[in-house]
Amino acid sequence: MEPTNVEILPNDLAINWSDGHETYIDFVTLRNACPCAACRGEGHLWGKTAPTIDASKLGADAFELMSVSGVGSYAISFVWGDKHDSGIFSYTLLKSLCQCDSCVAERAE
């Protein structure tokens, strides 16, 4: 499963997949799912460091998606309005964030 088209809409990211599925993810959900160490914390030998970005204190520009780029053949990265750009979103992660009725029902099972 690979994206065949990725488009930035006014409030959502739209992804068309090679299996024919269409994924729509609103920017707030997408930004809050950022997997980078600054947003999630980082594991190390002595436990886990706290995230350095406090999502509850992000300004409106943090939820403005500025650009999208591919990362190899497995992921997509984003640049946000606050210049945050370190998250690498795997295709699997992006598909898991799909908000269509079918995907929401499948995850609920």
Image (spheres, helix red, strand yellow):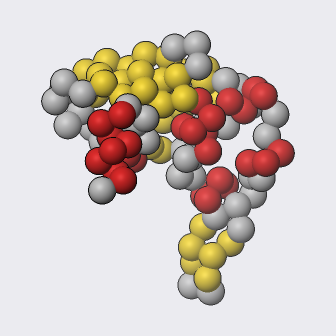
- Residue 108 visible in image: yes
Residue 33 shown left or right of residue 74 in the figure = right
Picture quadrant of residue 46: bottom right
Residue 29 shown left or right of residue 107 in the figure = right
Which quadrant: the C terminus?
bottom left
Q: Number of marks in the image? A: 0
Q: Tell me which residue sits at (41%, 21%) in the image.
A: 14
Residue 59: percent from left, percent from top: 81, 34
Q: Tell me which residue sits at (71%, 68%) in the image.
A: 50
Q: Tell me which residue sits at (55%, 47%) in the image.
A: 33
| Residue positioned most to the left | 19
- Residue 91 visible in image: no
| Residue positioned most to the top | 10
> Quick one: 8 or 71, which is closer to the camera?
8
Residue 15: percent from left, percent from top: 36, 24
Which quadrant: the N terminus?
top left
Q: Tell me which residue sits at (30%, 24%) in the image.
A: 22
Q: Compared with residue 5, is residue 93 higher up or lower down, i.e. above or below?
A: below
Picture quadrant of residue 43: bottom right
> Quick one: 87 or 28, which is closer to the camera?
28
Picture quadrant of residue 72: top left
> Quick one: 72 or 77, which is closer to the camera?
77
Residue 81: percent from left, percent from top: 70, 25
